[in-house]
Amino acid sequence: MPGEESIAVRLAGVSKQFGEVHALHDVTLAIRRGELLTLLGPSGCGKTTLLNLIAGFLMPDSGEIVIAGKRVTFTPTYRREIGFMFQSYALFPHMSVAANVGYGLRMRRIAKPDITRRVADALALVKLSGLEDRKPRELSGGQQQRVALARALVIRPKVLLLDEPLSALDRNLRAAMQIEIKDIQRKLGITTVFVTHDQSEALSLSDRIAVMAHGRIRQLGTAQEVYREPNDRFVASFVGDVNVLRARLVRIEKPDAEVLIGEQRITVSSRTLADAQPGTAVDLFVRPEDLRVAETGTPTAAHGKVAAQIYQGGHVDLHIDAPEIATARVLVRLAGHDGMTRWPVGTHIGLTLVANNAVAFKPETQA
């Protein structure tokens, strides 16, 4: 358990209910100083409610919230020393860029010379120097996003809260801003909580990810941990693309287990197979990049037919009908371009797993 001096935000047993809807159930979470932690989950999972509780926009029904060692469970927002960036940016349309950025400083009655200096520094940080006198309507979406970020940072918050700040941007600009936000966060060393439902965004930005569903944190870990070592079927299905394949449990020798799929024997972790008995069916969750077209003489997991090809630039996605191991089409992700010509639609192929990266769970009817 990390010491309190290394924790920026701590939530203990926090719950929130809106009428009959339980938005959060007994959430306990420790956010480390200087880390970027992402709250990831589908709409309605409770991630924005959790962010609003940290910000002080909502008060919990039960539990405790601590920021920088101070209990702030029922402390108003303006006394929490947090910076908040809204999904809509919430810029004042009648104010200039400089006035928008400096608004929080004026509310704190900071001296005018200090406001001017700090606003200039914040705009330089987000690469908007020279645009101080423009109005929000004169800016691009990406520039408006930078103004909102500068406004959140200029007050020198102890914690920065970002509520889906990139959702309104186009794909290329979103990717560029992901890099810039992470660079700024590292440069300042500021504790940041980032809300998103975009899995690729979470995987690329985060030091750790809290995957949420139905008002609970289902898994907390690094991007690699939640992608490669999911705790349960929901995390395995929600984070990244995955195939669910039918296999059979051969034996368990903790911490490992062996499963058989077609002709292939695969080693998996036994931690997700509690009480499973050898010989019973298991669902094998396999990432599309961990499947290959079997070469002659290679043990195969299954045979199937190419139903569709999707060219993605750096890779090709093959969609395979393989009814012996899967009800849905199997997705195979192949690096390079030759998948388009080597395995056209209608080709019969064998499939093989190339690494012991799969995760096995008991079928849902047995869970």
Image: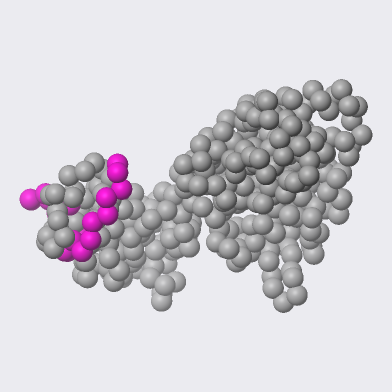
Nearer-the-camera pick, 225 or 277? 225
95 w.r.t. 252: above or below: above
* Image quadrant assignment for residue 47: bottom right
* Image quadrant assignment for residue 263: bottom left
Nearer-the-camera pick, 162 or 210? 162
Taking 17 as reference, is 279 left or right? left
Taking 147 as reference, is 265 left or right? left
| Residue 84 image point, x, y percent | 73, 45
| Residue range corresponding to the magenta coloring | 293-314
Q: Which residue is at a point 79% across and 58% down the rendered structure image?
A: 58
Q: Given the current orientation, which residue lies at the most extreme left position?
A: 296
Q: Which residue is at a point 7% across and 50% down the rendered structure image?
A: 296
Q: Which residue is at a point 34% across and 53% down the rendered structure image?
A: 287
In the picture, the quarter occupied by the C terminus is bottom left
Taking 236 as reference, is 288 left or right? left
User: Does the rendering let one see residue 218?
Assistant: no
Q: Which residue is at a point 43% across and 60% down the rendered structure image?
A: 237
In the picture, the quarter occupied by the N terminus is top right
Indicate yes or no whether the magenta region holds residue 86.
Answer: no
253 w.r.t. 114: above or below: below
* Image quadrant assignment for residue 257: bottom left
Colour theme: one colour
Indicate yes or no whether the magenta region holds residue 299.
Answer: yes
212 w.r.t. 71: above or below: below
| Residue 163 image point, x, y percent | 65, 50
| Residue 297 image point, x, y percent | 7, 51
Taking 277 as reference, is 114 left or right? right
Nearer-the-camera pick, 6 or 123? 123
| Residue 327 image point, x, y percent | 29, 71
User: Does the rendering let one see residue 116?
Assistant: yes
